Amino acid sequence: MPLPPRERFLSCLHQRSADRPSVGNAVSAATVHLMDETGCPFPDAHLDPDVMVGLAASSHEILGYDTIAPVFSVQHEAAALGCEVDWGRRDLMPDVVGRKYARADEIAIPPDFLSDSACVVVLEALRKLRARYPDVALVGKVFGPWTLGYHLFGVEPFLMMTLDDPPQVRRILDTLKEVAVVFAAAQFEAGADAMTLADHATGDLVSGKMYEDFLQPVHCELARRIDGPIILHICGDTADRLGAISRTGFECFHFDSKVPAARAREIVRAEGLLDDGRFRITLMGNINNPETLLRGSPDDVRREVEECLRQDIEIIGPECAVPLTTPTENLQAITEAVEDR
């Protein structure tokens, strides 16, 4: 008998037996087509919990995924930390447009951080979704200190600091990691089953050595301190740090198509097994966004899904937040291909 979606997702997340691999979304599967179909558009879906619920639920109701992930934007924490945010429009994601910090000692995490409307909307949406979908997996989302460094300091200034003032970067990471701990705990309490930790130390900007030097120790600490399963998301080619990621203690890594499924499985297998016989980390992904999902056909999607199935990828889904004009039939083809295996 088919498992309920929540049970299937959590079984695959923890590498337990399931009726089939799970299909899930760790970041955002929102598109303008789904906004039109649900009547729940951006920017309201970032700011109103009922609109957020309506659009998020389309991942399960329309796409057939085992998951619902209600956080579409990358800017909720930045807004709650006092940055001015342009919440975008129907076809444009939000962005920080206001002030940015220059030094670690300027960062102030408000004591009422979770009471800010940018956090409240996420927590309220999760509570509503939990009540409405008890048998569907809810995936919350927080941003790690490296991503928050980009948002609060600017990408180029923050990366230059890694060269010019490494101790300053370490102080920034040490301060901002608390945001992820606090917001993740609140989302789990609101009903999330798993938490995406998006921390964009992408291979295009950050070397594997930089990841191990600056960020892996922080990730190990977050894995210990956040009480619930964590899905780490990093875009780009992460093959040079996947071994280190598998040793953080995170339950799952959501990986990009720039790392072929066979290569990701090879790296994780080389890290050896835990005492209970599981791999050190579960793999989630990695269907290509810009070519396959956005511009390809359902048959193109099926071919990539079949490769993930050959490599025993536990949870299959888009590699990152999908382009806003992605055809619905291509997103549905992921589910259909897994169900037809």
Image: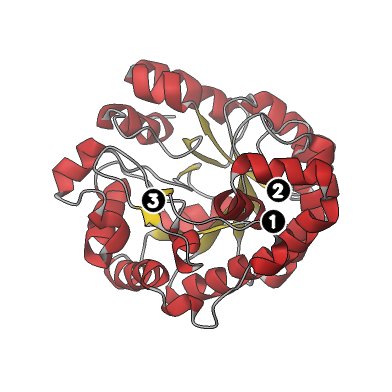
Amino acid found under the numbered disc labelled 2: Ile
Q: Judge whether 317 appears above or below 311 on screen.
A: below
- Residue 268 position within the rendered picture, expressed as x and y whole percent measured from the top left: 76, 38
Residue type of the residue flagged with mark 1: Phe
Camera-near label (1 vs 2) is: 1
The type of residue carrying mark 3 is Phe
Marks 1 and 3 sit apart, C-alpha to C-alpha, by 22 Å
Q: Position of residue 339 (x, y in %)?
A: 39, 35
Earlier in the chain: of badge 1 and badge 3, it is 3
Q: Name the residue beneath numbered marker 2.
A: 281
The answer to whether marks 1 and 2 mark residues whose Cβ atoms lie closer than 8 Å is: yes
Q: Residue at x 73, y 36 (%)?
A: 206
Q: Secondary structure at mark 3?
A: loop
- The residue that mark 3 highlights is 72
Residue name at image x 47 percent, y 53 percent: 8
* Front position in the image: 207 or 130: 207
- Pick whichever of labels 1 and 2 is earlier in the sequence: 1
**In the rendered view, how is the structure colored?**
secondary structure
* Residue wearing tag 1: 250
Q: Is residue 175 left or right of residue 310?
A: right
At horizontal 65% and vertical 27% (from top left) the residue drawn is 259
Q: Is residue 67 visible?
A: yes
**Marks 1 and 2, how far apart in space?**
7 Å
Residue 21's disc is none
Left or right: residue 53 compared with residue 180: left
Quadrant containing the C terminus in the rendered view:
top left
Q: Secondary structure at mark 1?
A: loop
